[in-house]
Amino acid sequence: MSFENSKLEEFNNYLDGRRVAIVGIGVSNIPLIEYMHEVGAEVTVFDEREIDEIDVEIMNKVICYDMEYSLGEDYLLNLVDFDIIFRSPSCLPSNPALLLEASRGAIITTEIEMFMELCPGIIIGVTGSDGKTTTSTLIYEILKAKGYNCYLGGNIGMPLFTKVSQMLPEDIIVLELSSFQLMNMKISPKISVVTNITPNHLNIHEDMEEYIEAKKSILKYQSKDDIVILNYDDNIVKSFAEDAIGKVIFFSHVAKIPEGYMVDRNSIKYCMRRI
């Protein structure tokens, strides 16, 4: 039986002729630029760097596709009257220009958030201050070795936005998610993993509370049928269970926990409550 991604088809129809802004253009945005061109969107790209500081391949794409661009120190002055804005993780949602456009009715999103909205497969999201790249890669490699059709992306791997049309409901997508990607995200993975939380990126985040709340977005929009896997040894991560909607599964390296997985010498054991 063939699968038709009706969400993707609806999104493509919506984009035709719409004014789309891409804020922050790195090499990873080339697929997004190409995709928007293919579906007929009217695209303007924005970047705080000058033209000679931007990757030549990207600018060649922008010019070849006859897209508008706004660069340099005041690059966001022209961010006016767009239907949808894709911000890069480095452009925080608290940016005044983004807030003003949102108040006018613009959709503010990111490539990874829109990917999650349109993806038909099972998404496993991994975040944490440390260990998320290793954890994401291990999950991907284990599932692939077991014969699952898997993709690895997010903060690592290939940009997955242009792969959505190839994905099926039974596919598994493993995403490494940074705090900047999770900020203001209105969707959570089917399975979420939080490795640990320590002070990080506080030169960019307003404070530790904002950083923690960004990480918590990975479970905030789960359903009761979803799963969140939390580090029992990290008090901040452990506290996320209080806000969990889905099933909580703890893991520990040092503690004998009431229910969940623990390391005992060279073995991984599952602890279960007695009824």
Image (tube, helix red, strand yellow):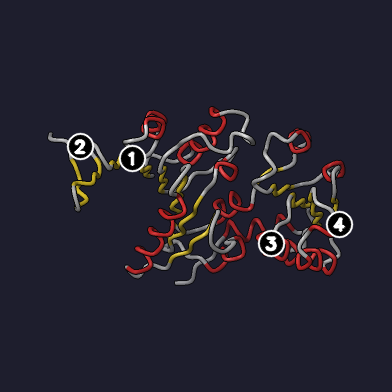
The reply to whether dot 4 and dot 3 touch (C-beta < 8 Å) is no
* Residue topped by disc 2: 256
Q: CA distance from mark 3 to mark 1?
A: 37 Å
* Distance CA(mark 4)–CA(mark 3): 18 Å
Instruction: From the image, tell me which residue sits under label 3.
Output: 27
Please name the residue that numbered disc 1 is placed on: 247
Marks 4 and 1, how far apart at CA? 47 Å
User: Which circle, 3 or 1, is nearer the viewer?
Assistant: 3
Circles 4, 1 touching at the beta carbon (< 8 Å):
no
Instruction: Residue 44: name its quadrant.
Output: bottom right
Give whichever of discs 2 and 4 has the lower sequence position: 4
**Residue 204: percent from left, percent from top:** 64, 36
In what quadrant of the picture does the C terminus appear? top left
Regarding mark 4 in the picture, which secondary structure is present there?
strand
Query: Residue under circle 4?
Result: 68
Residue at 48% over, 71% down: 2
* Mark 1: few/some/many CA within 10 Å (<14, 14-19, 20+): some
- CA separation, marks 2 and 4? 59 Å
Mark sitting on residue 120? none
| Residue type at tag 4 | Glu
